[in-house]
Amino acid sequence: ADEVPAMPMLPVIGSLPWLARIPDKDGKRWSFTEAQFEALPAIRHLYGPLVKVGLPGVGVGLYKEMYFCSDPNEYMHVMRAEGAYPYGAVQLQWAITDFSAKNLPLSFGLFSRGPSWRRVRFAMQKDILPPQAALRYTP
C-alpha cells in the first residue's frame, strides 16, 4: 500500500509549528490559522492531494492526526463511505449544537447527525449542490 505523505508532527501539538509557515510555490509563507485559503493550496503543492497532519482539537491520538484531502474525486469516496448520516465539522462545534438544541427548536435538527438532520439536508440540497445553483454565486 502507498504511504500517505505526512507533515512533521509532535506529540500533543501535532503539526502546528509547521502549519504556521507553509511556503507556497513562489516561496511566500502562509499561516494555516490566519490564511487557510492560501495555506491549503500551498500544502497541496508540497504534499499532494492527500496529506496527514496533526491538528489539535480536531485530530486524534497523541499526534492529533487527521487528513486533508483536496481531490474532489477522492473526497467523494469518503463521503459515500460515511453512510446516511455523515460526520461533519458541526459535530466539533459542541457549543453551537448544544445552544441550538436548547434554544432554537426551529433549527429542525440542522446541527445534529441523524434522521432530522437528513430531512433538512435533503430539503436544502437541491439549492446547494447542483452546478446550476453554484453558478448563481460566481461573477
Image (cartoon, grey):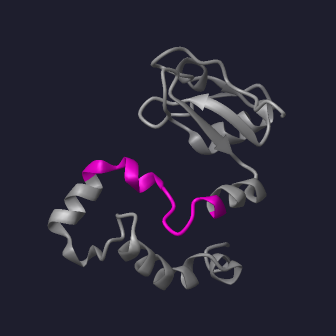
Figure quadrant of the N terminus:
top right
Looking at the picture, how far across and down is residue 31, in whole percent? Answer: 57, 30
Image point (56%, 38%), residue name: 35
Image point (48%, 20%), residue name: 62
The residue at the far top in this view is: 10
Q: How many marks?
A: 0
Asked which quadrant contains residue 12, the reply is top left
Image point (48%, 81%), residue name: 124
Looking at the picture, how far across and down is residue 77, in whole percent? Answer: 71, 58
Please state if 55 lies on the left or on the right of 70 as rendered.
Answer: left
Magenta stretch holds residue 90: yes
Looking at the picture, how far across and down is residue 103, in whole percent? Answer: 15, 66
- Comparing 94 with 31, the one in front is 94
Asked which quadrant contains residue 45, the reply is top right
Magenta region, residue range: 80-95
Asked which quadrant contains residue 8, the reply is top right
- Comparing 115 with 20, the one in front is 115
